[in-house]
Image: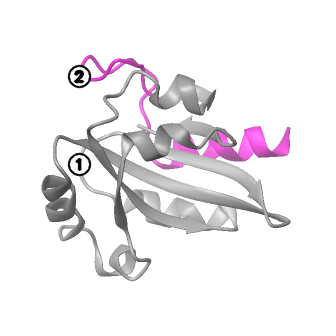
Amino acid sequence: MRRIIMILALAVLSGCALQPDPQYHTGQCVGKMTTEEAYGHLDPNRYTIQVLALSEERDIRGYLREIPGQDPIWVNWKHSLGKSWYAVIYGDFATKQEAKQRIQTLSPRILAQGPFVRSFAEVQSDKQTDVFRMR
């Protein structure tokens, strides 16, 4: 229950809207989802950016505020090697090059975390993840 409250607080603190966004197939802030529910409708040949991965949920709040634009943001969490990990996934890009160019627009603080490009095929293959869409 505490985890759900923290995730909802993250949604509010990140300025997440509760109304559907017609630009995307799913509504904004739809809550906890499976990998299939979050990413199954996305083209596996498109790309996204894994902005960062942290072991403390509370640490991601500040980073979320620094991610520019209105592209979708998802927080994936899973338990691995005895720890919980929270990965922030950002954007939906047609090409790997487009995603790499977007990385260059991120703040120095986010760049220090080592963001990298992933295909949605890679993201969709991670079945042991719970997902929360932030915007």
Determine if residue 123 is in view: yes
Q: Where residue 23 is drawn, which disc sits there?
A: 2
Q: How many numbered dots are placed on residues in this image?
A: 2
Q: Are marks 2 and 1 in contact (CB under 8 Å)?
A: no
Q: Decide whether the magenta segment is chiefly helix, strand or loop.
A: loop
Where residue 44 appears, as percent x and y from the top left, is: 34, 34
The stretch in magenta equals 1-30
Determine if residue 29 is in view: no
Judge from the rendering whether residue 102 lies leftward or rightward of residue 11; answer left or right: left
Picture quarter containing residue 81?
bottom right
Tell whether position 3 is magenta: yes
Q: Looking at the image, tell me whether mark 2 or mark 1 is earlier in sequence order.
A: 2
Q: Residue at x 35, y 66 (%)?
A: 116
Report, in whole angstroms, how far the alpha carbon at label 2 lies from the one at label 1.
Answer: 13 Å
Can you tell which of label 2 and label 1 is closer to the viewer? 2
**25 versus 5 height, above or below:** above
Instruction: Out of 21 and 120, give the one closest to the viewer.
Output: 120
**7 versus 106 height, above or below:** above
Name the residue type under label 2: Gln
Q: Residue at x 35, y 39 (%)?
A: 72
Residue on which disc 1 sits: 69
